[in-house]
Image: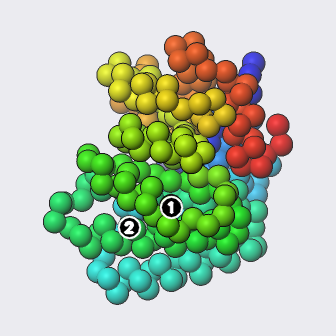
Amino acid sequence: MTPLFDSHCHYNLSPLLEDWREHWQSAQNEGVRHSIVVGTDLTSSQKAIKLAEQNNNLRAAVGVHPSEWNGLDFQTTRKQIEKITKNLKKIIQEHNVAAIGETGLDFFRIETADAQSRENQAAAFRAHIALADEHALPLIIHARDTTDEAYTAILENLKKYKKNDTPVILHCMSGPVEYIKEAVRRGYFFGVAGNVTYKNADELRKKVALVPPGQLLLETDAPFLPPNAHRGEVCQPYFIAETAEYVRAKLNRDLEEIYQTTCRVFGAHT
Ligand SMILES: [Zn+2]
């Protein structure tokens, strides 16, 4: 069995958190050797650290999801970013952290007129970029929008503010073709989740085909985004085996290469 590396999984969120040991065991039974447990706010980041400290092959990413900044005013956002940054720095100094994230821009549920939420997300994103640079850690980015706006802004912010060449991971890849192409040129990494197996995902599969070997990673994003056979269910981490098999058989990707790439990105032993 080719070993698998789940580059994005939320054992730290309900309903996985309650039985995370069993989920992790089932995933290992399906060949998963490593998993990045990704924080979405301060509490879930701390939980990710806790889980990682109980298991060598679970590693924590710490950060605050872009949607957490929606609807806040300017002052509150500034204070919150300061507080979060301080807390995350402390966590990074005291614990073994594998990456910063998830951060990014998600304009999917924001009203067009809501400029404040966009600004909040961008300010928080820049704070995460700075953290990744300062601590030489990979940066895990969440991007979602119905237009090109968030994707364009992500590329601009990274170009302007990302100083070190630590790995940039675009998790659950999506977005316009030009954005994907530019990210490929810059050497960013792309996480492919269970939605690549959906019947109506031809557009996504075309985009995956643009990503050269050595820049492609696998993820579950569990408990979200179950693969096709499990649509409508809670995504369980062991479902990654189905996504992996699809990526191997239908998209002609080398799973061993994906595994080696992911180990390199997160500095994990193979
Ligand atoms: Zn996620």
- Counting from the top left corner in percent of width and height, residue 92 is at 70, 70
Residue under the image location 43 percent in, 60 percent down: 156
Instruction: Report the coloring of the rendering.
Output: rainbow
- Helix, strand, or loop for circle 1? helix
In the image: residue 55, left or right of residue 129: right
**Within 8 Å of ligand 1, the CB of disc 1?**
no
Q: Residues within 10 Å of mark 1 (few under 14, many from 20)?
A: few
In the image: residue 179, left or right of residue 214: left
Tell me where residue 27 sits by quadrant. Answer: top right
The correct choice, above or below, for 95 with respect to 208 in the image is below
Distance between the alpha carbons at the discs numbered 1 and 2:
17 Å
Circle 1: residue type: Lys
The reply to whether residue 165 is visible in this rendering is yes
- Helix, strand, or loop for circle 2? helix
- Which disc number belongs to residue 121? 2
Tell me where residue 239 sits by quadrant. Answer: top right
In the image: residue 143, left or right of residue 8: left
Q: Depth check: give the residue in front, 146 or 238.
A: 146
Location of the C terminus (image quadrant): top right
The correct choice, above or below, for 84 with respect to 171 in the image is below
Residue annotated with mark 1: 159
- Counting from the top left corner in percent of width and height, residue 71 is at 27, 71
Circle 2: residue type: Gln
- Counting from the top left corner in percent of width and height, residue 230 is at 43, 24
Residue under the image location 49 percent in, 25 percent down: 209
Q: Residue furthest left?
A: 113
Residue under the image location 38 percent in, 67 percent down: 121
Q: Depth check: give the residue in front, 24 or 198.
A: 198
